[in-house]
Every structure is written in C-alpha cells, then in structure tokens.
Image (cartoon, rainbow, N blue to C red):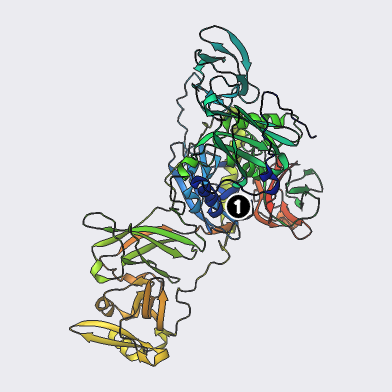
Amino acid sequence: MNRIIKPGILSVIGFFLLFFLNQELKAQDSLGWVKTIREYHARTIREKLFVHTDREQYIAGEKLWLKIYSMDEGLSYPLKISRIVYLELLDKDLNPRVQIKAGLEDGHGHSYISIPKSMITGNYTLRAYTQWMKNENPEFYFTKTISVINPYIAQKPSKLSSKTSYTLDILPEGGNLVNGIRSQIGFKISDQNGKGVEASGWLTCLQTKKSVSLKTLYKGMGKFEFIPNKSLDYYLSFKLSDTLIHQKLPKAFDEGYTLAIVKEDSLVKVMVKCSPDLKGLPIYLLVENRDQVKGMENAFMKSDSLLLLIPKRKLGEGVIDFILFNSKGKPIADRILFERPKMVLSIEANLSATNWSKRSPIQLELSTLNPSGKPESSNLSLSVFLLDSLNRIPTENIQSYVFLRSEVKGRIENPNDYFNKDNPKVDEQGDLLMLTQGWRRIKWEEILKKDPNYFQYLPEREGFLIQGKVINKVNGSPVPHILTSLSKPGNHFDFQPCISDENGNVYYSFKPFQGNYDLVSQTINKADSNYRIDLENPFSEKFGKYTLEPLNLSPGIRQSLLSQSISSQIQDVFYAKKLKYLEGIKSLDTTRFYGIPDRNYNLDEYKRFTNMEEVIREYILDVHLRKKSGNFDFYVSNTPLLSFFDDPPLVLMDGVLIKDINKLMAFDPLKIKGIEVISRTYFQGPLLNEGIISFRTYKGDLAGFSLDPSSLSQEFKGLQNNLEFYSPQYESAKEKTSRLPDFRNELYWNPEIQTDNNGKSVSRFYTSDDTGEYAIVVQGRNSTGLYGSKILTFKIKN
C-alpha cells in the first residue's frame, strides 16, 4: 500500500531518489573518493563459498563428506574464478587440526575430511576459502561448527566456571548518539558463548533517578528510543538469574549525524538528522546490496532533518546497507536492513512412503522449480542420516547463509528462523537482528587509503598459484629481478620459471594435481647460488573471531554414542575397501608443460650402455655433446633451420632443472627410462629455451640423483584424492538376509545431483539395520543464482 508522508518537523527533500528508478549513479565525479568507490565496485569481484556437510556431528575416525558451492557475492551466480578451495578444521585455540585442498569445476566441488582418531572430543570450526578470498577480512570466510566425539580417549573434565558471564552490547541506530536528537538504541545480552539471554531491566538517569522499564524481545535483543542530554548520565541495568548487569550508555556527541531506517509496505524511509552547526553542508548516501551499488546521491542538509523515500522493490533482497558520507568521503553513519528473499529455488522431495523396513530400497524423487513454478535444471547435494541425540537437523541452509549469515558479523542463532514466512513476527525479528548485530562489510575509510589496483592474492583460475619470495641467504633480504624455477617432480612433472618482482616475490602457476609432492625451487643461473626461494604457506594465517561453545555431552546420549561408534568401526572393517577413488577434478591434465616432444627415445628399445656419454652420442641424434676443459655441454638441433642452436638447452630430470651437466653425465644411464627432446625454440614465461632435453627415470623420483646444493625441496600438498561414498545394495534375497551387520546411521550422500531440463532427478538407496527417524537434507541452486533447500523425514521400523 502506498502512503503519503506529509512534512511535519521534517523537511522532505523534493527529489524522490530518482537514481533508484533509473539505476544511474549521479554523484559528483569531481570528488575523488566518489570515483574511488565507483572504481572499487567496478573492478572488484567478491567470491563467497557455502559448504554443505553430510552431518554436523562425527565420531573420531569417520569421514566428513562435503559439497562446495562457489558464488559471485553480488549476483550469486556460480563463480568460476577459482579452482582450488582450502578447508580447515580449527580447534578452540585456532590451531588447524586438519588441512585439505579441494578442486572446483564450474563453481562446484566435493571432497571429504578424514577426522583423525587422535582428535579429542569437542567443537571445531570448519572454515573454507580461496586465495582470492584471502584479500578480504577472514570474518567472511565460510565457517561452520563441527562436533567431534572421541569415545576412545577419555575426556578431561572441563574447568567450567560456576557462574555464567554475560555481555551487554548497546548499539545506537546509525552508529552514534548526538545530544538533543531522538535516536533508537538496540541492545543485546549474550552469554560467554554469544548466545542471547532473555532478561528484564531499566534505563536510569543518574542525576534524576528516574527510570524506564525495558525487556528483551527476541533471543536477548531489544530496543528503545532515547534523546541524550549532555548534562545527564544514563545507565542500562538488567537483572539475570545469577547477576546484575549495569552499563553506561555510549557517549553522545555535540556535533554529528543520526541515521534511522523504517520499512513500510512498499517504501523505505531514510531519516537523516544533524546537529545545528552542520546545517547547509552536503551529505552523500550510498546504498549497497550484496556488493551491488543500488544507488548513490548527494543532498544538502537545508534544515536539521532530511527524509528520503525509497521504493523497496529497487533495493534487492538480503542485507541492504545504507551508508552516509560527508563531503570528505568519511563514513558518518551506517544502518542495514534485512529483506527476506522471495526469489528462491523451490525443491520438492517425494517418497512413496514414510515408514520403511530394514534393508529396503528407497526411491527419492526430486523436483526443482523457479519462482514462477516452471521446471528449472539445478545442481543439488543430498544427505540422508539418522536423527538421534547426536545428529540433528541443521539450523542453517544454503539460503540463510548466502542471504544473511555471510553478510553480518558475529554469531546468529538459528539463521533459518529469519526465513520462516509463517512467523508473523519474522520481519520484526530480522530488523532487530540488523539493529543489534549488523555491521558494514566494507571499511571505506581503509579502502580509500589503499591503492585501488592492489590485491595481495590473485585468484587461482587455472590451478595452483604458488607464491614465494627470493631471499639472500647471507643477510635474509628479498632479492628482485632473479630468474627462478619451481619443479613438481614425477612421471607427470611440471616446471615453471618466474622472475622475482621488486619485492622479491615470485608466482608459479601449476595445473591441478592430486597427492603430496616435494617441490624443488632453485635459481636458473649458476651464479645465483647465494639465493633461496621460500614458498609461502597457502593456508590463511589470519583468523576471525570464531565463537565455539563447549561440547557438553549429556548422559542421555550414551546409547547413540555407542551405536555410532560401533557403526564407525564396522564401516572400517567391512566397507573400507569398497570406497572407490574418483578423479578429483574433471580436467586433471597430465600433459607435460611442453606438450608432445619432437623426439621421444625409449632407451629400453636400444642396447643399454653403462656410460651416459655413449648413450647420448650413439642414440640421441637431436643432441650434440661437447666437452671443453673437462666440462660437458649439450646443444640441441634447430629442426626448422636444419642446424644446431648456439646456446645450451634447458635440461631437466623428472621435471627438475639440471645445472651441472657433468653430474648428469656421471649418472647411471640404466636408471633412465627415456629421453624427450624439443628441437625448436620454446618460450615459457620469461624463459627462452633453445631446445629442451628431458630425462625420465622409471619411477619419476630422480632415482637417487643428487640435487644442486643451491636448490631447496619443500613439501606441498595437492588436491585430496576423492572417494565415492559407499552405500550397499540389497537387490537379492541372499544379500538382504546376509549376517554381515549394517549399522549405518548415514544411508546416503550424493554431492552431485543434476536435475534435468524438466527439473527432475531420482536417487536410490537402501535402508540399514538401524531403526529410528531419518532426515533427508537437500541443498542446491540453479545457474542463475536461485538457492533452495528441503528437509524431509521418514522412519525405519523393525
């Protein structure tokens, strides 16, 4: 319903924010900071991850299965700028207990984490990010609490205080209080774990002794209106079961602005007020939604009040940020709103029954529809597990993470609650959350100081982008302009050269690979033996404020814990061998960096000599061997010009640069399986090679060849080898009556379900011997950025 707002004490400015209607930015380009903001949004792509785990509680030794969704922060489309995701399990002290790397293909990926049997019982933080995301505050990495229970290691009694500690946060709307201006103040009472606590209290003036009663409204949050007086002091007091909280209100300023937001049916009212001495000065309003600029406009405070009317339909969905700037580009007020998304992917899940017997086949039909009710091809992930005192239905799904929790700081209890359209108070509760917990994701005062084109970390678009620094061994200083190389030895080796930049930094790009390798770094020129290359840890060493509650196990979970522990051990004994290794990423390329060689000499096809010089001179026709002053050198034929190159070629063994040809000539040729020759000029980054000679051993492990003393070998973990979740099939009577126990409490996990053009998909799995209620959890999205989830339950009976 449209409403007419009449000017009372407010001065209604006569522009109806036309920039929201025509979606143009009309701010003054003459202001440098405005230009910087424009450029920042124009050039910056923000990446966001969501990780769907098969469950949230695990026994030590089990596998945590996961599906990764990568998306554009602004448009929510599947994002394809990164191919590597870094995942960690952090303990309460932020120590990484497990670190793995998973591959992404077209914005999706899946993997697993083997939870060590040595992990003690407790809650852990699962976090995920890409190299590109490391340019952002680590508060915005994906995080999720994972519970691990280790029944094999006795849990030490936790030293819990008998008295709960509480925190009272007092947050003026817009950021600051200004003397004489009525403002709304939000407050939140939380315990030491960040959980909201309900309480009643009062606002008291110290001088007049007058008080006003207050109470929390939802999950420890509340609000009230207040006009500060600089000559008076005010306190908030709340009485809880075992303590009394008493805290002074934030200081009010004599000069400043306030910003208030009110949602109507179809409009949003933006109310700006200022102290008298600021009248007549310009202000600038920036409105953002999920990293998209929805509008930017300037106005003058002709009086001490300004009212702006904004059509709600132009603001977008999710968290919307209203930022007020002064003429110098300094943020002076900030307020965020939450608009529950209506454009969602509808996921329908159908079972032919709700009760099943043991070892019975279940067929699950999934349908995906767009908001218009039309079928929509979508990518989904599916988990089916037993609900008991250990495993519960998740309180967060892909939609509540993308549109809410990923956009604000701190803990949000049960994010799914703010998407419950059947709750008549859901919008009021969402606004209360924004008032007490929301914050500005972008710290513009920091952005405006930085070089707008500087990013410390680059996206891994093709595979691993390994960073390092060239260091002088003598004094430890970085060394610029040095030609270096990094090798991944093996049968499928890779070799990458790079020149260090002004700060000694080097970057090597490798195709995605699985498994662990000792990478060999060295300078290419023999004269640079006093330098070394230190590779940077690819895992982030910055951490946000991750709140972990203690894992308190009640006596009632004993039977569930015993059942899951037995199930885990049976899986290890009877089913471990049935887990199938899968290719971790579709385009895992094993081609050598130089492609197909011009000549490939398989030495086992020739008479084997025990002297390397004889091998080269007798068989390798494309290579001319010279010996001068006791030193050997190779020269490769220049096939296009029917001659030999004047300079020596690049010489490799299993992908490792060989500088000392004499050492190679003294090596046992019986350990060499083959020799490949590139008999033409080959350009590779900064390196121009007059031919390449590549020696290959049988196992790709250098066969005992000693590396150059100036080289450095450093371990690097590649992508995790993916496994296929094993789900037994009971198709025959013999299999169904088998005495082999099946105590699986997780029946099915499928990270890659693609509905067809009719939005349909069918999944089949079998029940186990464990009776009880089971949950089916489906998460997913389509190609245009619509997200959805579905939860269904059924029972297995005797």
Q: Nearer the viewer, residue 212 or 297?
A: 297
**Residue 79 x, y percent position in the rendering:** 59, 56
> Residue 609 location, x and y as percent?
32, 86
Q: Secondary structure at mark 1?
A: strand
Point 33% across, 59% down: residue: 502
**Which of the pair 340/142 is nearer the observer?**
340
Position of 346 compared to 320: left or right? Answer: right
Say which quadrant the N terminus sits in: top right
Side (left or right) of 185 relative to 364 = left
Q: Position of residue 508 (x, y in %)?
A: 41, 63
Residue extending farthest to the left is: 629
Residue 556 in the image: above or below residue 140 = above
Asked whether 40 or 751 is in front, the reply is: 40
Residue 338 in picture, x, y percent from top left: 65, 36
Name the image quarter holding the C terminus. top right
Q: Residues within 10 Å of mark 1 (few under 14, many from 20)?
A: many
Residue 117 seen in this snapshot? no
Q: Residue at x 56, y 29 (%)?
A: 279
Is residue 661 positioned above or below 521 on the image?
below
Pointer 1 residue: 71
Q: Residue at x 79, y 55 (%)?
A: 375
Which of the two residues, 357 or 264, is positioned nearer the viewer here? 264
Is residue 758 visible in the rendered structure shown here? yes
Image: 318 above or below 581: above
Residue type at mark 1: give it.
Met
Q: Quadrant of residue 753?
A: bottom right
